[in-house]
Image: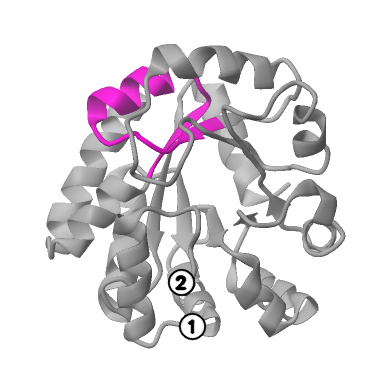
Amino acid sequence: MTRIDAKFAALKAEGKTAFVSYVMAGDPDYETSLEIVRALPGAGVDIIELGLPFTDPMADGPTIQLAGQRALEGGMTLNRTLDLARTFRQEDDTTPIVLMGYYNPIYSHGVEAFLTAAKEAGIDGLIVVDLPPEEDDELCLPAQAAGLNFIRLATPTTDDTRLPAVLQNTSGFVYYVSITGITGAAEAEATDVAPDVARIKAATDLPVVVGFGINTPEKAAAVGAVADGVVVGSAIVSKIGAGNTVADVSAFVKSLSDGAHSA
């Protein structure tokens, strides 16, 4: 059982919705980023999604693209991202960390070497947005064999014909993308999300977590009421990009987690 599995089991026992926060590793700089990540569990974050900076983030909107640029310009690399996770783990051995990004940096590093290093650094799961199920031999299956969850995205266009392929080798949770398009492009509506969440839950025992377009405590509560968890990314990253202090970012995250946990 991974930390992700254990976390969802504990939340289910408490009847609580998971709150997942996304931040870009190294944004706005390494030290501040580490301070922000360290503050997330205290702000009510159940699972941390740690963005892996990449030069061509095709699924991300301007907010997260700019965060990635800031991180890369500050010297952030795959190895430094794992270093950040490793340092976080010195103080927190329970909060799950999901590394989210694209395949190119992992491929360039070498899959086997990456998985060994990620596991050692305390990474619990991977979301690699540009590897479809047809490429499971590349990373998904080796990751599962190494003890890492491989979390797949489902979208509003994932119909009943495609869904079994998406779910086949997924573990940890299913990430339902509430809108079509890039991150930060529109707002999620619980009434639109609910039928698809129910459809996915009918096909899997895995928790279904909803992300994209959730940017207020009220939205987190509404979506959390129809899903097993909610993800907020762009709204948090926007606060970081605007130069808010770690305390201000943490307070904003706490308001979102309170919303999700009230569902």
Q: How many numbered marks does the figure carry? A: 2
User: Callout 2, which amino acid?
Assistant: Pro
Quick check: 216 above or below 114?
Answer: above
User: Callout 1, which amino acid?
Assistant: Thr
Q: Residue at 54% x, 83% y: name it.
A: 79
Q: Residue at 83% x, 55% y: name it.
A: 136
Pinpoint residue 167: horizontal percent, then vertical percent. Answer: 77, 35
Judged from the image, the secondary structure of the residue bearing numbered disc 1 is loop
User: Colour scheme in the image?
Assistant: one colour
Residue situated in front as seen by the camera: 13 or 75:
75
Residue situated in front as seen by the camera: 250 or 243:
243
Res. 213 mark: none
Residue situated in front as seen by the camera: 198 or 258:
198
* Side of 211 relative to 253 (left or right): right
Residue situated in front as seen by the camera: 4 or 100:
100
Quick check: 11 above or below 73?
Answer: above
Kindly give the residue lying farthest to the bottom in the view shown: 75
Pinpoint residue 148: horizontal percent, then vertical percent. Answer: 72, 57
* Side of 137 relative to 181 (left or right): right
Res. 77 mark: 1
Quadrant for the C terminus in the image: top left
* Range shown magenta: 209-232
Q: Does residue 223 show up magenta in the picture?
A: yes
Pinpoint residue 208: horizontal percent, then vertical percent. Answer: 59, 29
Q: From where the camera sits, is residue 219 visible?
A: yes
* Residues at circles 1 and 2 in contact by the CB criterion of under 8 Å: yes
**Residue hosting label 2:** 53
Residue 70 sits in which quadrant? bottom left
- The residues bearing labels 1 and 2 have C-alpha atoms spaced at a distance of 7 Å
Judged from the image, the secondary structure of the residue bearing numbered disc 2 is loop
Pinpoint residue 58: horizontal percent, then vertical percent. Answer: 50, 59
